[in-house]
């Protein structure tokens, strides 16, 4: 009889462990899905920013002055 109780306890513990692992696996799978969705959204936004802001010209380049020293009054 003591042997039967011990076997039943082991079966219960095994089932509980399997249930916990199944729940843990589900939580991990959901977390990985959230991370993947977040990464996809971030990459999509980065591509959009590259398209939109990559073609904007801030201004013309400043002309370079060659061979001329600019005066700077420090008094």
Image: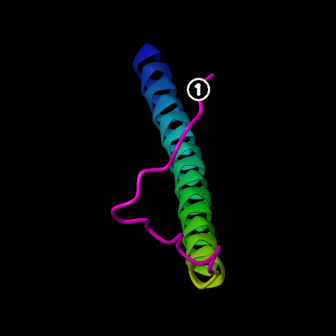
Label 1 residue SS: loop
Whole-percent x and y of residue 39? Answer: 54, 63
Query: Which of the 4 image quadrants contains residue 68?
Result: bottom left
Q: Which residues are magenta?
A: 57-75
As for residue 66 lying within the magenta part, the answer is yes
Give the farthest residue toward the left: 67
23 vs 10, nearest the viewer:
23
Identify whether 33 is placed above or below 7.
below
- Counting labels gives 1
Answer few, some or many: residues within 10 Å of disc 1's Cα (few below 14, many 20 plus, some between 14 and 19). Answer: few
- Residue ID at (45%, 35%): 14
As for residue 69 lying within the magenta part, the answer is yes
Identify whether 19 is placed above or below 39.
above
Q: Colour scheme used in the picture? A: rainbow
Name the quarter where the C terminus is drawn: top right
Q: Which residue is the site of mark 1?
A: 74
Whole-percent x and y of residue 45? Answer: 64, 72
Identify whether 46 is placed above or below 17.
below
33 vs 64, nearest the viewer:
64
Whole-percent x and y of residue 25? Answer: 51, 50
30 vs 59, nearest the viewer:
59
Give the farthest residue toward the top: 2
- Residue ID at (54%, 69%): 62
- Residue ID at (53%, 74%): 61
Dominant SS of magenta comes to loop
């Amino acid at each position: 009889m003591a042997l039967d109780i011990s076997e039943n306890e082991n079966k219960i513990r095994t089932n509980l462990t399997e249930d916990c692992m199944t729940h843990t696996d589900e939580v991990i799978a959901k977390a990985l899905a959230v991370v993947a969705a977040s990464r996809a959204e971030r990459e999509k936004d980065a591509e959009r920013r590259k398209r939109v802001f990559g073609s904007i010209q801030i201004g013309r380049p400043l002309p370079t002055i060659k061979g001329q020293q600019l005066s700077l009054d420090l008094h």
